Amino acid sequence: MKRRDYILSIFWLLMFSGLLVSCEMRPIKKTTQPVKSPLNIRVEAENFTDSALPITVLSDRINSPSSGWIALDVPIPVAGRYRAAVRLSSEGSEGASCWIEDYVDNQDGRTYNITGTMELPASSAMEIVSREGSPLNAGTHHMKLHFSSPVKIDWVQFTLMKEQVLTPLTMTQQTAGTDWKLVWSDEFEGTEVDTSKWTYDFGDWGWGNNELQYYTQYRQENARIEHGNLVIEARKDDQGAAWTSARLTTRGKVSFLYGKIEFRAKVPPKRGNWAAGWTLGDAYVDELSWPYCGEIDIMESVGYEMDDATGDGIAHASAHCRAYYFKLGNQPTSTLPVKNMYEDYHTYAVEWTPEGIKAFVDDQHYFTYEDTTSDWAWPFSKPQNIILNLAMGGGWGGAHGMDADMRSQKMLIDYVRVYERP
């Protein structure tokens, strides 16, 4: 076969397979460190595969006459965190909004929103709207671009920002003994966040909950060591974002299997915040991983449940897995009223053994989970990472709106400790 004929045959093979993807790639070195070279995967308008409404392809643009969605297949070569961008224009008089759904053919009937809502002003000019940090696993992703009103679409592009980093160390704690012994901790006694223990999650993709904050990296205004505490501060109208904040995780540094995990903290009042110390399965790569990977909520607090004057609030502890989670309406959870969560330190802990999980506030036991009968019910025989974060808004934090006077919120963590019982 002549070279020209070979190239044409490949071209038509791609066309008839339903998708022709324009990729701009530079060679990257496989590494556990963040990728330095850009990796862009662009799907052009003429290559969308399906739609929920009649559309017209004009040259290299798609015109939509109303709200709806366009389907696209995106081949992601490297697992990691991506910048998702769409180039489009609003064809209506009131602007438009759009968002990207991943894994539209998932078996659980879930909706995986990997960008949150992206707003577009009323204008016939082409604009680029984007979100950062969207998690994507390697492989072909069946997606939908949803839009709220008439738009003209040019392309959708995903740019790798950071390659997925495998966690090099798992600490497995003994639990059959009688006395707890400290095996790992961060007392936050230094001058900077210890990046040998913590990774910064980053981005503003909504985190599956349409949250408002952009989680920053290595930024003192959002995460710092101060007077022996880790201070996580959310700041309004900051760095061009509605809110900035921080989310620290041990993923990529160390994961844990069993033991007692506790942290001592103060959490903020006022409507709109959502403070948490929790664990997430080390098997998490992107949104399809959850809830199969498992999640243990050591403590969650939402500001609208707290008395702003007294600081009295409610601590929540939960376990999430494929057998029990919000989609099924059977999430195992318990709550405990806590005096002055804002101005007084309280110790939040879980005791996690092969037999079950128990949660405590100041040594008061108030939650138990013990279903170990299947992999769906008990993913907790596999390692988990610790996460500390302060979110703003979203499906739970923003359920009662946002306090209009709120400009800054702080979560103070005195220490995080892990114990075993040898």
Image (cartoon, helix red, strand yellow):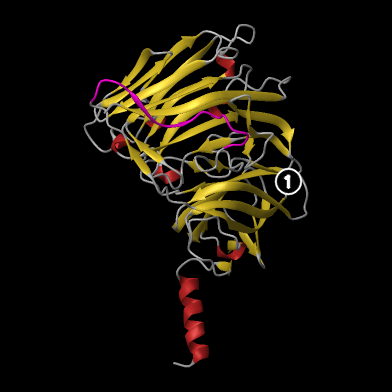
Q: Nearer the viewer, residue 135 or 30?
A: 30
Q: Is residue 318 visible?
A: yes
Against 161, is 224 above or below? above
**Residue 181 counted in the magenta span:** yes
**Residue 349 counted in the magenta span:** no
At 49% across and 48% down in the image, what residue appears?
A: 102
Give the quadrant of the C terminus.
Answer: top left
The answer to which quarter of the image holds residue 272 is: top right
- Left or right: 214 as drawn, with respect to 21: right
At 64% across and 53% down in the image, what residue appears?
A: 86
The answer to which quarter of the image holds residue 98 is: top right
At 51% across and 78% down in the image, what residue appears?
A: 11
**Secondary structure of the magenta portion, mostly?**
loop
User: Which stretch appears magenta?
Assistant: 177-193
Against 298, is 158 above or below? below
User: Which amino acid lies under the numbered mark 1 shown in the image of this protein?
Assistant: Gly
At 48% across and 72% down in the image, what residue appears?
A: 14
Whole-percent x, y for residue 214 in the image: 64, 39
Whole-percent x, y for residue 72 in the image: 52, 57
- Left or right: 403 as drawn, with respect to 300: right
Q: Nearer the viewer, residue 407 or 104?
A: 407
Give the quadrant of the N terminus.
Answer: bottom left
Q: Nearer the viewer, residue 150 or 43?
A: 43
Whole-percent x, y for residue 370 in the image: 26, 24
Whole-percent x, y for residue 238 in the image: 73, 35
